[in-house]
Amino acid sequence: MMQKLDLGRKMLLTGVGVAAIAGSIAFGTGARQVKAQSPQSSPTFEVVSVKAYKSLNPGKGGDLRGPTFLPGGRFTSRAPLTMVIAAAYDIPFSSPDARISGGPDWISSLDLVYDIEATSPKEVASDGMSASAEATRERQMIQALLADRFKLVVRRQPKKIPVYVLTVEKGGPKFPIADIQEKDCPAVPANASADGDTVCHRFNGGRGRGLHARAVNMSDLANFVQGWTDRPLFDETGLQGLYHIETEPWLPMELNSSRTNVDGVDVNDLPTIFTVFERLGLKMAAQERNVDTLVIDHVEKPTEN
């Protein structure tokens, strides 16, 4: 069975995963066993290289690199296979233990990390494709890679787990509507670098620098913030359209009580993420609910090339 991550390793992998392409879960509710998307039913990479990575810091993960699509259709990853699976199936890496189960211990080990490099065929172009459509295609390509090289077979299964739900406070939202709306958003690849002046659906910053976005929706907000929460975060605000978001940094949920300084800021001066949302006119509340999870029924170590 997949091993549980200790706090230090979970913090490390979460930090790497924030930069990856994983977003919110988007499964059906059936428990049907499926092989990761087959090459026949989805776009595939043209060239794939998979090699065990000889870490400069064995067991510490200091040179990890999250699963990422780069300009030109190149995919790269240097991380435990669990992170690649999470990216392929649109699962935030903030709480993998709750949403991915099964499989051998090696898939989440920092001691056996695979360096994956893959290149998309030239005919797979993103011109005119929306960011969400391109992200879906990219996930399908990673699924096909996992099916081919790691023989991954997964099962989708509902499970009741602790979550957070984001709603609007009685006084309403306290952030402005964006100065640009969806129809006017520039067409940019889903993997483009964030630029608060020109790009929709992108954030600059994070927990240590605060959130800064010119034009994002509430789903973008929930998906981005749950990279730093200890439970999945779901948007139930009902707010439509794009908004301008600016916040201050917030206190880490996993903060060790002996620490007094985080990212150069006295922790006594930092609000919690709950307070940050309150100042936006939103509420993050704890609940339990049925969420579709991913069960790994079969996976193999790959033949390297």
Image (spheres, rainbow, N blue to C red):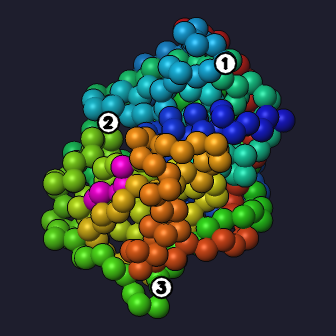
Distance from disc 1 to disc 3, alpha carbons, whole Å, reads 44 Å
| Residue 158 image offset from top left, x and y in percent | 75, 62
At label 2, the amino acid type is Val
Q: Secondary structure at mark 3?
A: loop
Residue 131 showing in the rendered view: no
Return the residue at label 1. Answer: 59
Return the residue at label 3. Answer: 169
Picture layout, residue 38 above or below residue 180: above
Residue at image position (65%, 33%) is 9
Which label lies toward us, 3 or 2? 3
| Residue 86 image offset from top left, x and y in percent | 59, 42
Q: Secondary structure at mark 1?
A: loop
Residue at image position (32%, 36%) is 124
Residue 168 showing in the rendered view: yes
Q: Earlier in the sequence, mark 1 or mark 3?
A: 1
Going by the image, does 9 lie left or right of 297? left
Return the residue at label 2. Answer: 124
Which quadrant of the figure contains the C terminus? top right
Distance from disc 1 to disc 2, alpha carbons, whole Å, reads 37 Å
Mainly helix, strand or loop, the magenta region? strand
| Residue 103 image offset from top left, x and y in percent | 78, 34
Residue at image position (27%, 41%) is 193
Q: Decide which of 118, 5 is in the foreground and name it.
A: 5
